[in-house]
Image (tube, rainbow, N blue to C red):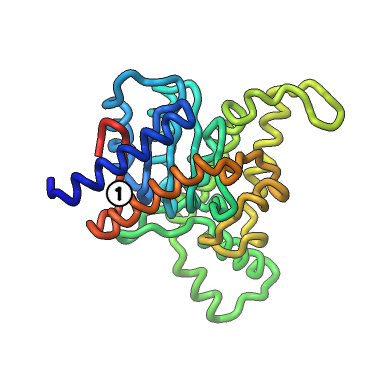
């Protein structure tokens, strides 16, 4: 390891320990697109941790990715920890939003953002947002039913791959299914009474509320863009998500920001696109 790398590692390890002490939790940073292979990196990192605590805090930064990879990552994390905190210093988009919503607690500040739930599918060596294809197809199908298709639109419809469309539909259904399951099971597990009328909360009420959140984050006509960030205030007031503002804790905010900025600079310098860091793994 080069002297500069060794110095940066010591700094990052130090900031990670401070965050761990502040949250009374193990800490793992994931800065990466959510693509196949990341799930194995997460497994290796968690299995390498010694003297595990009951809680893990995951510092997450991702543009999104493949929802099946999220499912394996959540399974790995939950196999080792009874409580999960997801900390978002910048963004956790698309499949990253689903990962964040699998946590017991979500921590953000005013600058952080989640995104619309728009799973991505591997296509021609890249990732494409499933909802963009589905929404366009549904729009054209409606125009076709009303016999309003233009010649150009008819040509577009004829080129659509029905197998791919089915794959996109299944990705959307899986995203919703996982989100409803995880919100009900983890984030809403301590929700015992409704705030207004003081009613006892049932499992079905938790699932219904989770579905409302999934529907809200699936509204393409509301968010307009796959890459649009939804800030903490909007998530709290419009979507109805309970999120902890770590910006109200100056010491923790400084530790998270110093750690995140240093790690991001290091990744940019080394041209790394995937990074998983724990106290035992760099």
Q: Residues within 10 Å of mark 1 (few under 14, many from 20)?
A: some
Instruction: Tell me what residue is drawn at x 56 percent, y 64 percent.
Output: 225
Residue 165 lies left or right of residue 2; in this view the side is right
Residue 116, given in percent of the width and then of the height, sits at 57, 53
Depicted 26 relative to depicted 29: above or below: above
Instruction: Tell me what residue is drawn at x 43 percent, y 37 percent.
Output: 58
Depicted 150 relative to depicted 235: above or below: below
User: Which residue in the rendered view is the most extreme toward the right?
Assistant: 197
Residue 101 lies left or right of residue 235; in this view the side is left
Residue 268 lies left or right of residue 163; in this view the side is left
Residue 98 appears in view: no
Residue 128 appears in view: yes
Instruction: Tell me what residue is drawn at x 59 percent, y 33 percent.
Output: 183
Q: How many marks?
A: 1
Q: Residue 28 is drawn in which quadrant?
A: top left
Residue 172, given in percent of the width and then of the height, sits at 53, 47
Instruction: Tell me what residue is drawn at x 66 percent, y 41 percent.
Output: 241
Residue 121, given in percent of the width and then of the height, sits at 41, 53
SS assignment at label 1: loop
User: Which residue in the rendered view is the most extreme toward the bottom?
Assistant: 151
Q: Residue 271 is drawn in which quadrant?
A: bottom left
Query: Which is nearer the eye, 98 or 5?
Result: 5
Q: Quadrant of the N terminus?
A: top left
Query: Which is nearer the eye, 118 or 28?
Result: 28
In this figure, which residue is indicated by the disc labeled 1? 274
Residue 206 lies left or right of residue 227; in this view the side is right
Q: Quadrant of the C terminus?
A: top left
Depicted 26 relative to depicted 31: above or below: above
Residue 144, given in percent of the width and then of the height, sits at 63, 69
Query: Which is nearer the eye, 118 or 261?
Result: 261
């Amino acid at each position: 390891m080069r002297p500069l790398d060794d110095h940066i590692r010591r700094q990052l390890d130090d900031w990670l320990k401070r965050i761990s002490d502040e949250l009374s939790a193990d800490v793992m940073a994931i800065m990466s697109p959510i693509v196949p292979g990341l799930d194995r990196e997460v497994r290796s990192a968690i299995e390498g941790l010694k003297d595990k605590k009951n809680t893990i805090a995951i510092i997450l930064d991702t543009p999104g990715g493949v929802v099946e990879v999220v499912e394996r990552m959540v399974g790995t994390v939950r196999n080792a920890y009874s409580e999960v905190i997801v900390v978002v210093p910048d963004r956790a988009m698309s499949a990253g939003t689903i990962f964040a919503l699998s946590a017991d607690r979500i921590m953000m500040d005013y600058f952080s953002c989640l995104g619309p739930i728009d799973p991505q599918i591997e296509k021609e060596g890249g990732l494409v947002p499933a909802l963009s294809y589905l929404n366009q197809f549904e729009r054209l199908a409606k125009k076709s039913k009303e016999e309003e298709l233009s010649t150009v639109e008819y040509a577009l419809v004829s080129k659509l791959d029905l197998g791919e469309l089915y794959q996109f539909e299944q990705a959307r259904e899986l995203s919703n299914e996982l989100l409803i399951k995880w919100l009900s099971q983890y984030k809403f597990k301590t929700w015992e009474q409704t705030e207004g009328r003081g009613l006892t909360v049932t499992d079905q009420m938790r699932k219904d509320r989770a579905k409302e959140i999934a529907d809200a984050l699936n509204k393409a006509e509301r968010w307009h863009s796959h890459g649009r960030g939804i800030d903490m205030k909007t998530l709290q007031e419009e979507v109805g998500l309970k999120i902890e503002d770590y910006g109200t804790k100056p010491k923790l905010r400084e530790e998270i920001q110093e750690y995140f900025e240093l790690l991001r600079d290091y990744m940019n310098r080394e041209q790394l696109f995937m990074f998983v860091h724990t106290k035992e793994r760099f």
